[in-house]
């Protein structure tokens, strides 16, 4: 089910900010940026030291372009100031604390004041409204409700809209489907990979997705391809939109697609986004791909300046037919730390996914195994066959395998060994899918 773009102009949650002229928005951004820099210089020792090192005082910022004079903030800076070293308000004013899992080191800790939570609910309400959600919807949130920000962020936004919220959290897939049936869920919030797992489980249970009330799918937290969107829509019979956020700057709500699905609208009054070349650290031209750098300009407890997200995207030039005037972000291609370099060739998992989704005979479940043999990088692509292929002759399977290997080589100039595996062999995820296993010791 897809909704035409020309039917959504009335679905704008906050016209004041979402349809503000670019000149007015730039002035608002400048004023909020100046106030934010004053705040962090006064209250955060880390930023005061960084600014003093380059002899910068907040009063020197005269234009948005001056932001490029300031140093970047990276994830290690958050870990080095664990847990509260980057908070800009006393802990008594912080009403919510979230953090990362900390699986690769100390977790990153972020805080929210009462007003921060209100701003968070506001930007998510805009994003969800753009994706089709109204007060008449029943929103099932299949994100983790722990320290991960995804569940709470979408919860606040849906409640602000006035929708009915089902905080089903992650996991217990069969129960999720029973809830969809019994509670008449109309909007599903989860990762795109989990949406496919839900569709797969529905088929096992004999549940026809057309018998459900689903209309909207709001998916994020991991890169996914346009082909995967089509697969989800075909299997779940809903309209799927992409959205983006990260805990370090707020959580979900940084940007999200409207039903035109021509880029994600950025909450420009809350976030300043730059795109840089990750090698030179210089800004790229408008419309070119690069690493996203985000500065919060409307956050009290945990403002962050020029945060290097490691996510690869670009700003889409021009206006959107939906009537919003905000800048738009292209679908996240991948992360600089997820990008594979195979014998000198840069490759993102999403590129392999896009190719696999176009090939009949395989399922949208795959894993990339990277290793180094005799000082040379190797890439193995494990992909599940569908049930029909299981009965084919060996020659047919070999032909399919060779076809995928040839297409990878022709499209991406990378040699890969493709291994077709039985259905349901690759482990499913109730959260972010693990697409890459890198066995190299780099």
Image (cartoon, grey):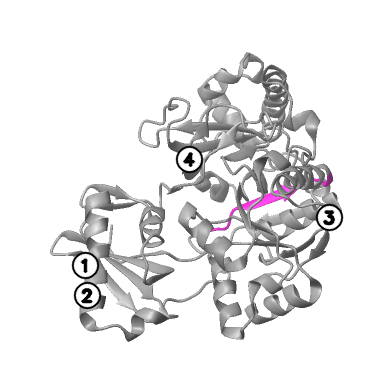
Percent x, y of residue 238: 64, 60
Q: CA distance from mark 1 to mark 4?
A: 32 Å
| Horizontal side, residue 292 vs residue 38: left or right | left
Query: Label 2, on which residue?
Result: 398
Q: CA distance from mark 2 to mark 1?
A: 6 Å
Q: Secondary structure at mark 4?
A: strand
Label 2 Cα neighbours within 10 Å, binned few <14 / some 14-19 / many ≥20: few
Instruction: Say if mark 2 contacts mark 1, CB within 8 Å.
Output: yes
Answer with mark 3 or mark 2, whichever residue precedes in sequence.
3
Q: Secondary structure at mark 1?
A: helix
Q: CA distance from mark 3 to mark 4?
A: 30 Å
Percent x, y of residue 321: 64, 33
Q: Which is more foreground, mark 3 or mark 2? A: 2
Percent x, y of residue 241: 61, 51
Q: Which is more foreground, mark 2 or mark 4? A: 2
Q: Is residue 296 magenta?
A: no
Q: CA distance from mark 3 to mark 1?
A: 50 Å
Instruction: Say if mark 3 contacts mark 1, CB within 8 Å.
Output: no
Q: CA distance from mark 2 to mark 4?
A: 36 Å
Q: Which is more foreground, mark 3 or mark 1? A: 1
Query: Label 3, on which residue?
Result: 159
């Amino acid at each position: 089910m897809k909704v035409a773009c020309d039917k959504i102009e009335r679905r704008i949650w906050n016209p004041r900010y979402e349809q503000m002229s670019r000149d007015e928005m730039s002035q608002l951004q400048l004023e909020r940026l100046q106030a934010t820099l004053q705040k962090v210089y006064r209250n955060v020792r880390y930023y005061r030291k960084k600014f003093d090192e380059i002899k910068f005082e907040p009063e020197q910022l005269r234009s948005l372009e001056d932001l490029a004079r300031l140093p970047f903030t990276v994830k290690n800076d958050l870990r080095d100031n664990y847990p509260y070293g980057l908070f800009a308000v006393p802990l008594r004013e912080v009403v919510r604390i979230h953090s990362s899992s900390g699986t690769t080191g100390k977790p990153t800790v972020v805080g929210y004041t009462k007003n921060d939570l209100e701003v968070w609910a506001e930007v998510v309400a805009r994003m969800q409204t753009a994706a089709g959600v109204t007060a008449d919807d029943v929103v099932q949130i299949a994100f983790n409700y722990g320290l991960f920000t995804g569940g709470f962020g979408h919860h606040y936004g849906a409640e602000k809209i006035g929708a009915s919220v089902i905080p089903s959290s992650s996991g217990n897939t069969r129960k999720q489907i029973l809830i969809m049936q019994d509670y008449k869920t109309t909007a599903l919030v989860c990762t795109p990979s989990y949406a496919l797992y839900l569709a797969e489980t529905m088929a096992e249970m004999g549940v026809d997705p057309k018998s459900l009330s689903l209309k909207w799918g709001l998916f994020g937290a991991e890169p996914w391809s346009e082909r995967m969107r089509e697969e989800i829509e075909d299997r779940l019979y809903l309209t799927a939109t992409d959205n983006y956020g990260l805990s370090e700057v707020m959580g979900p709500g940084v940007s999200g697609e409207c039903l035109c699905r021509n880029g994600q609208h950025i909450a420009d009054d809350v976030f300043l986004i730059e795109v840089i070349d990750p090698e030179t650290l210089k800004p790229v031209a408008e419309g070119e791909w690069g690493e996203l750098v985000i500065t919060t300009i409307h956050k009290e407890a945990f403002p962050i300046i020029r945060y290097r997200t490691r996510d690869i995207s670009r700003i889409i030039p021009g206006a959107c037919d939906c009537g919003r005037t905000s800048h738009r972000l292209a679908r996240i291609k991948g992360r600089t730390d997820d990008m594979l370099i195979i014998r000198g060739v840069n490759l993102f998992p999403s590129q392999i996914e896009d190719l696999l989704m176009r090939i009949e005979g395989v399922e949208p479940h795959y894993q990339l195994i990277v290793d180094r043999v005799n000082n040379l990088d190797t890439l193995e692509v494990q992909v599940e066959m569908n049930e029909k292929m299981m009965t084919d002759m060996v020659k047919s399977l070999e032909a399919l395998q060779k076809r995928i290997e040839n297409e990878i080589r022709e499209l991406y100039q990378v040699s890969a060994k493709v291994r077709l595996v039985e259905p349901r062999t690759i482990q499913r995820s109730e959260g972010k899918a693990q697409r890459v296993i890198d066995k190299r010791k780099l």
